[in-house]
Image: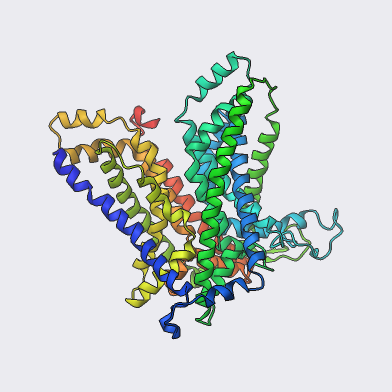
Amino acid sequence: MKGISKKAVILFPLATSVLLLLPLLFGFVDTLLPAFGYLPIASKTELNLSVWRELFSYSSLWHSLALSIFTGWVAAILSLVSALWLIMHCYQSAWWRFLEKSLAPFLAIPHAAMAIALLFLLAPSGWLVRLVSPWLTGFDYPPMWQSTQDAWGLSLIVTLWIKELPFMLLVLMAACSQLPVQRSLAIGQSFAYSSQQIWRQVLFPQLIKRIRLPFFTVLAFSLTVVDVAQIIGPTKPVTFALLVWQWFSDSNIEMRLLGAAGSLLLLAAVILSLLVAVLLEKLYLKHNLQSALKGLRKASSSAKPARILLVGTVLLLVLSLLIIVIWSFTWRWRFPDALPAQWGWHYWQQAGSYLYTPLLNSLSIALLSSASSLVLVVGCLEYQLKQAQPSRWWSLVMYLPLLLPQVVFLFGVQVQLFKYRLDGSLLTVVWAHLIFVLPYVYLALVDNYRSFDNRYMQAAISLSHSYWRSFLRIKLPMLTRPLGLAFAIGFAVSIAQYLPTLFVGGGRVTTLTTEAVALASGGDRRVTAVMVIWQTLLPLLVYSMVIIWPKWRYRHHRGMQT
């Protein structure tokens, strides 16, 4: 039975590799050729460097590129440092238990929804200014300052930081569970070191090594994000990733040559940034080791600033979601009123006319892509467990779609699908989402799956049960919670996808995210609010179901409640 099972599960890593690597390879090739002037559809059939000369002479190129690097690096570093700081001051306290319970809902909020919510909150005509006007500010009209879409990209940094912080906390909490944290703290304190000093000099270096790839994912995303930058980022000039996307979507087809070259330049910037991150990590570890060898004792610092940061972040998130709900029930709301002058259900009553198709598409795509990803990931992990020496490069294969800028290969994927008339269908959009959902499902499940005590399976097989029956009746039920969480994370990732839907859907497959981003660029705030609520509500409902269902299903099994 074991031999048959091993032969059967080898199909899963093969299928997964094909689904992930083939679109990356062919998509990159079909982007590489236009970058050197080859685009037959525009009567460009000779390879040359004229596209690159045009790219480097573009007026706002270097400003946009510098803006992307600045905002991406600052947002990623802020997410990492603040997450480490919160972990250090909240570990094994009531705040830690709060984080464990509250991270999932915050992870469920799509990036675009968070950007729109913060736009409604922080804009010059946003709720924060309304709450203090005119009695404190004296404003009877919205001020002329730029608190969003500012030239330095500060609002973009805040949005990315707030959205990526829960993810960094989640991966750090998972990494902490793999380290002897309590023992390290006890030993260090016995030598008169403060707990914060032990965290900084002993635990942080170990944690940083374990979350290297997740941090690279955050950094690459922050450098190449398009939808968030389009909503709340700078406009004159835009970030480089958004500039490349504008070239690709230009009505002049020859601009796609410029977009292809720009996407390769963006890829080079991401690769260089990742190499710099590796260098900075080595420098940090070297400096930290030298500091630890000095043996100096330092006094403990107060935990209040970290807790204030946590409370402030949660409050900002809650206010952002609250203002979306208020706008969805608004009929008339003039500045500087703190609350609407007239409330109404009109935009909810009319929601069916503009919401039905995006909602149905989003739900169908997310369910299909997350369920397929979960099956493939379970099969891959099961195959890895059967190997004497699991392949080390498998994690890199899974991370590759997250480390590459989406615009680098999605254009090529669009070209291939258009060539065979496969673009614009729901199934191809599901496949495009699968490329990005699979890695997140893998990351969410891999540690819990590998830590499963295989003696339960051995005991079940020894009682004359087949491998597959034991797998379905014993292992999967015992992994219900991590499987459900992985599915919920995949569902939320699919709901949030913007560029894959636009490139592969060809504008014919609309989702809640594509409609929300389009409305945020100049649509009615009340319609936008209704769209964003549904965009956020779907992942939250799935998260709630995967938390509640195991408790109800195994309510009479005490051992399954932990």
Residue found at x 35% / y 46%: 394
Q: Position of residue 287 (x, y in %)?
A: 61, 33
Q: Is residue 452 above or below residue 426?
A: above
Q: Is residue 51 above or below residue 194?
A: below
Q: Position of residue 493 (x, y in %)?
A: 46, 54
Residue reaching furthest front?
48
- Does any portion of residue 13 appear in the rendered image? yes
Is 436 on the left-hand or right-hand side of 302? left
Residue reaching furthest bottom?
43
Q: Quadrant of residue 471?
A: top left
Residue found at x 62% / y 30%: 89
Is 293 on the left-hand or right-hand side of 553? right
Residue found at x 59% / y 17%: 189
Q: Position of residue 241 (x, y in %)?
A: 56, 64
Q: Is residue 370 above or below residue 45?
A: above
Residue reaching furthest top?
190
Q: Position of residue 104 (x, y in %)?
A: 50, 44
- Along the viewing direction, whichever of 456 and 283 lies nearer the viewer: 283
- Along the viewing direction, whichever of 85 and 344 lies nearer the viewer: 85
Is 527 on the left-hand or right-hand side of 124? left
- Does any portion of residue 93 appear in the rendered image? no
- Along the viewing direction, whichever of 124 and 9 lies nearer the viewer: 9
Which quadrant: the N terminus? top left
